[in-house]
Amino acid sequence: MSDDSAAGAEADLPEGVERRTFGGRERLSTRGAQVYGEPVDAEGWRAWDAGRSKLGAMLELGMDTGLVGDESVLYLGAASGTTVSHVADFAGPTYAVEFAPRPVRDLVGVAEDRTNLFPLLKDARDPESYAHVVESGIDCLVMDVATRGQATVAVRNRQFLADDGRLLMAVKARSEDVTAEPDDVFDDVVAELESAYEILDTARLDRFHADHLGIVARPK
Amino acid sequence: MTDAWFAGADPDDPESGATRVRTGRASAPADWPAEAVDAGFAADDTDYYAKLRSATLAAASEAVAERERADDVQLAHAVRAMDDAERTANELAERVVEWAGTLYEDVPRGLDGVRDIAARDPKTAAEERVVSYATRAVDLLDERDDLRAFIEERAPTTAPNLAEMAGPVLAARLIALAGGLESLAKKPSGTVQVLGAEDALFAHLKGRATSPKHGVIFTHEYVRGTRPQDRGSAARALAGKLSIAARIDHYSGDYRPDLHDELADRMATIRARADEEADE
């Protein structure tokens, strides 16, 4: 596939994320224990599938995430740990919040192979239920929650972020309203986010994820 | 005094930290690693994160095990397994009857045919295969019956009002479709009414169809046994009481006979419409 949409000034990848060749194709990769049957090269780098990871897609599309590596991360909507495993490979302390028990069973398995990944079976809409565990001054808040009110969740979790921290968010249009036009949904989400965040960049992730918008923002 | 997860936890016992991780709350986050070192809970940051890791891993594993062992989750799995077993048995039966028809003259149709073939004494290699195959299908049918018996025994203790009103199997189906008894209890009755009719509902929301009158509750006698022009009312009345039943089962758990009488009265009123029109 040609890389037309990511043409132009491409942001630097964080330390610990590299483009390497897997099966003749250049792909993102991080170094760590294998998680979901992804290809691993001889030096222990494992391919990061942008089609299965919204954050992977944001990096693949060249969005400036501000990630440099080794930051503290609060990841909301960790699911079974596909993406968060890659994050923990290059980041520092990584708190992974997921609401559904079944995926957390897998997430615990991913965390057992890593020293800096802390799984939490908690509801991201209720930050007080994990504020006694997650530290303040987090460098990066990653959000991939497929529930209605995604912007509200981002605003409520603003309190964890350092003033110069980053919000990296993937908005799923269909979680807000299955019948509305995705663009209208995205406008509403961005408008609500602006009460607490300054939007730095947005990009449609459609090449990898239909009807998703990637957002990079920082606290106001 | 701090709200931190490590407050009051034994630094050398991940279990005590795990309990605090699961049950604690704080109004706002703080620099917990620094506080833990100041409080003497951890020697340094590295030690703190190692202790945090043990506590969160233990807490998440325990919480998952507890939620997944819960009775409503078991019911949901059982009813899905029952449907799988039945669907697969029917699929195997079709092949058995088809195949056996080429070897035997007198093969009854359908699942009866399968039981009949499985009971036969094979005389050739081909007959041996088809009889063996039929035996698997019969085993699967028996498994389906055992699963149904399990649901009939469990549903009344897990959700007494819902099981009484919907019948144990439909109660289990509603719980499975909603994703648990708690989720079912939190759904509005309009949603309960169309659970299992999601395709039709989304077609309607996109403007391609009329709104569905009922989902899986169609299998209930109150809906199926009501004449078509009154089925919408019947489904609405049943769904309303079913969601109240689910709420009572989730939040209190005691059996309320009144609820079932009210529904019976309402249904009698709806069905009386047919008689009134017949009299006119």
Image: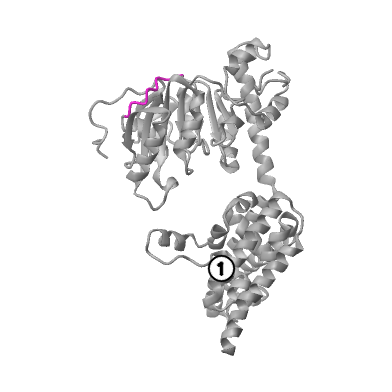
**Residue lying at 69% horizontally and 65% vertically, measured from the top left:** B165
Q: Closest to the observer: A68 or A217?
A: A217
Quarter of the N terminus of chain B within the rendering? top right
Q: Is residue B105 magenta?
A: no
Q: Secondary structure at mark 1?
A: helix
**By what rule are the colours in the image chosen?**
one colour
Could you tell me residue B142's position as x and y percent? 68, 66
Amino acid found under the numbered disc labelled 1: Leu
Q: Is residue A64 magenta?
A: yes
Residue A47 seen in the figure: no
> Quarter of the image holding residue A17?
top left
Query: Which residue in the protein does label 1 denote?
Result: B92
The chain letter for the residue carrying disc 1 is B
> Quarter of the image holding residue A121?
top right
Q: Residues within 10 Å of mark 1 (few under 14, many from 20)?
A: many
Apparent side of residue A153 relative to residue A17 in the rendered image (left or right) = right
**Residue lying at 65% horizontally and 61% vertically, measured from the top left:** B171
